[in-house]
Image (cartoon, coloured by chain):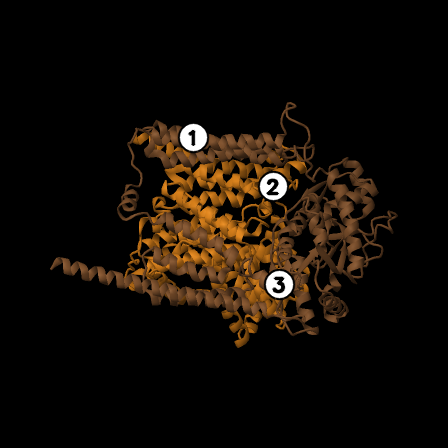
Amino acid sequence: MDAILSQLLSAFGGLMGWQPLLVIVIGVTLGIIVGAMPGLSPSMGVALLVPFTYNMSPTLALVLLVSIYIAACYGGSITAITINAPGTAAAMVTSFDGYPLTRQGKPGMALGVSVVASAVAGVISALILIFFSVPLAAVAVKFHPAEYFALALFGLATVASLAGREWLKAFLAACLGLALNTVGTDPISGADRFTFGFVELSDGFNLIPALIGLFALSEVFTAIEKRDFLPQKLDSLGQAWPRIRDYWQLKWTMLLSSLGGTVVGIFPGAGATIASFLCYDFAKRTSKHPEEFGKGSLQGVAASESANSASVGGALVPLLTMGIPGSATTAVLIGAMMIHKLTPGPQLFYDKPHIIYGLFAAILLANIVMLVIGLLGSRLWVQVTAVPKQPLYVLITLMCVLGCYSVRNSMFDVFCGLLFGLLGWVMKRYKFPVAPVILGLVLGSIAETNFRRAIMMDGEWVFLTRPLSAILLAVAALSFLIPMVANMRSKSSEN
Amino acid sequence: MPSAQKRDSTKALRRRRWRCTLHILIYLTTALICFTADTLHAQTTPEPFPRRPIRIIVYTGPGGLIDFTARKFAEVARKYDSSQPIVIINKPGAGGIVAFDEVLQQPADGYNVLAVTRSNITKIVSANREDLIDAVDWIAYLMDNPHVVITNTDSGLDTWDGLQQHSQKNAGRQLWLGADIGGVKHISAINVWERTGIKARWIPYASGGQAVSALLGEIGHVYFGNPADATGKPQLKIVAVCAAERMSAFPEAPTFTELGIPGLEHENIWRGLALKKGTPQHILDWFDDICRKVTADAEWRDTWRSEGITLTYKPTAEFTKIVEADRAEFRTRLIQLGLIKQRNEEKLFGVIHPESAVSLTNLLLITIFFVSLILVVRSPYKHHFGEVAISAAAAILACILLVMSFLLPQPNEVDRVGASGVPRLWSVALLLLAAMQVVILLGRKIGGVKLEENIATASTSQGLLFVPFVLLFAAYLGAVVFFGYILSTLIFLPLAMWLIRYRKFVTISLIALCWLAFAYFVFEKTLFVDLPRGIFAGFFQ
């Protein structure tokens, strides 16, 4: 422990020059922009910056790329809150409460909480990464496909409590997402499924166009239908920003979601979206005011943002300790490390500790820089909501087009975005929730591949014979049943 | 007096309309001038090569080994010809078929290069798109690395012999973790199994990283793939290499030949470049020259030294031979695996092809959907029209997937769920939920709940805005495909604003200009997002 601390302190000393600080500021700023734009993913942001790091020292290069990664995960929440266009899939959960707050004239509250929650979670997950990464990684690799399957079901079960009384519609939406997820090449057998002859569909529906369509475009369509053209009235700025007390009230939510987010982030392939959903669901179940969730609860914003920002630290655990990329962005980071002749893994801790601890120190520092830039920037972002609505709608539409397009440079995805937009519009019009569709699209393939992989490896009974998987499945079943029973009870008592 | 006032106001209205038309005309003329200037610029681009940035199209997202190879190639190549930048464009999709199609749509002028790997060949063959192999020149074979057998020493398996004994003891239950079924690694593994008599199961993972992670957790016995995946993990050991000689980066790892198993020397993955057929000779010569220089470059060699990669430049003739051999091998293997779709000539009940039967059923289902909608509109339940329609659509989708799942490959003894199992499960769930929803709706009091009254009144009192907006939007997307992003956006933006009653001409023009500048400089120039240029742009080049 002492050794870690002294290494960390000397690393902080190394970062105190103008060059590393400038690199962090640039990285964080770029990351926020990349994250905020729907369609530009953190992995793309990091990949685009890799060529600029060729002439930097390995430490500096990693500091820049990790700063972008961290900030991009936060940046997704900005557009989720202000215009209901989540920049990343994980930020979708933030929009559940963030956007209603904007509609109530309190975007500042949501933006403030989101940046503080992100920074706090970033620091907490970095501390976990620094002190506990080795044992955590050792546990994570032991996860059998059966357990991944149980984890995915656990994620799906959140639909039951998220939906409340409209649980039937929510499950219908989730099943729609799951069914749409089966379109494309079957990940196990390689057979083409339901592609109707479209080559572009052979990788299935891309998540980002679905996200942009269901959330952002459908919102524009609904607003145009309702002729909602009057500019948003903002509360006077003094009232609209959270006070220290507001943040303090969220301390447990932030802490627990940070822990949860880090842990889920560690599992290769699970990712930030599941982390956000699970922590949001947990926060709702344990909250004193669960009825506020989905209508503008600061707790909801804090839970989701802490979880998805904390998952960054989690994803770095298997990357640094074992050289395993758990997410798309960490895969790009491995490539960047290769360019700089660094082989991530336990050996790196012995050979080049200054790089590892420099990176740890940079993560802590980047979160603080992100807090400052985020809070300053939020004053700017708030103004977006005061822009006259008509041009704003057209610009959001154009942003959606670029966003869908830039994922794979493909017009096909833009058309998919339009279709999902119409789907979202019609669903919202008749009070079907759209988020479960995305949840189904995200979790469908994790559930299916791991289900089949588990059976191929150890037969059908493996789900019950492995204790962890059995426990997780039981918890998933409970978290599915309890809200349903509670709902039915409240309904029957009303009648 | 009121009539004079009225006349004045109509005059003012007419004047305003005239001014509006004038503004639109000015706007459109400017737009057209921009477009023609753009295409003329493209038209006057003559030889020699390169006069524009060269684009390397990578068939994966950022972060894969081929993406990294392309980026490093671009960087090293600039040392030898820095007249134009080389940019990397990621066009993922269908294991490379999307990238191939993209390059083949462009003229054969050398500005669109495909970064290719051996994986492309399996995907192309299994998708029955072998025309793509013939449509390009395989201009440069740059490198290859052998497939290797990696084990986790913690599990007690640390030699090839040990692995073979383990396989015999566990009779077909040894687990080999790797990439997709029918991919290069899977086919190589089958070749290894055939030569060595090993009986094992192939467990596919979405990425090498996830498979290695499972090996580290001792969830499987073997990882079969790239040697680089073993680096930095002390408990992993390469126990056999598919190569003629030992790799310099892993000198302690024995080859199969040394282990007394010949014939596996070419089980590898190669990476290289391809151009559309018909590219002029002097451009091919330019690429030949640059590839030779890059292959000899010290920095390039240094990059790959620790990865177990062999750098050998092979020009078109040699490369094409390798591709042809791979194509033949993969075709045979993929037919054995049942992964090449062959039309089922057997008729259902001796009457109709299964495919046609499924199409007919789908048609019938869609008809039922529309008929039921009409019935609902005419029934007392029309207030629930929207909800019923959504549920019915979901139910029909579920039925269509259910019916189509019968065309999918059936489960086998290893993959006991099969490609059709999970889609059927979701479809049945969707069908049940949709049916429940409809039953609940129909059980409600008729006309009890009137949905969204405010929307209905708003739409009828002021005319419908939503439908024209969506139509305009769809037309815009169509226009982008044909006329390119810049021109279409220039026209769509003011039209859309005008449609939703925003009529400040100067502001609109400013917004349009700022947006296009943003899209061009930020997306096209900085982020290398390849904005659509329209299919007509190709004719001018």
- Measured from the top left, where is residue B470 in percent x and y? 40, 49
Chain ID, mark 2: A
- Measured from the top left, where is residue B63 in percent x and y? 62, 58
B210 or B354, which lies in front?
B354
Side of B46 relative to A308 (left or right) = right
Q: Residue furthest bottom?
A: A18
Q: Is residue A399 above or below residue B201?
A: below
**Disc 2 target residue:** A450
Quarter placement of the C terminus of chain A: top left
A482 or B391, which lies in front?
B391
Residue type at mark 3: give it. Ile
Please tell me in which quadrant of the rendered image residue B13 appears.
bottom left
Side of A422 relative to B69 (left or right) = left
**Disc 3 target residue:** B88
Residue type at mark 1: give it. Val
Q: What is the secondary structure assignment of the residue under circle 2?
A: helix
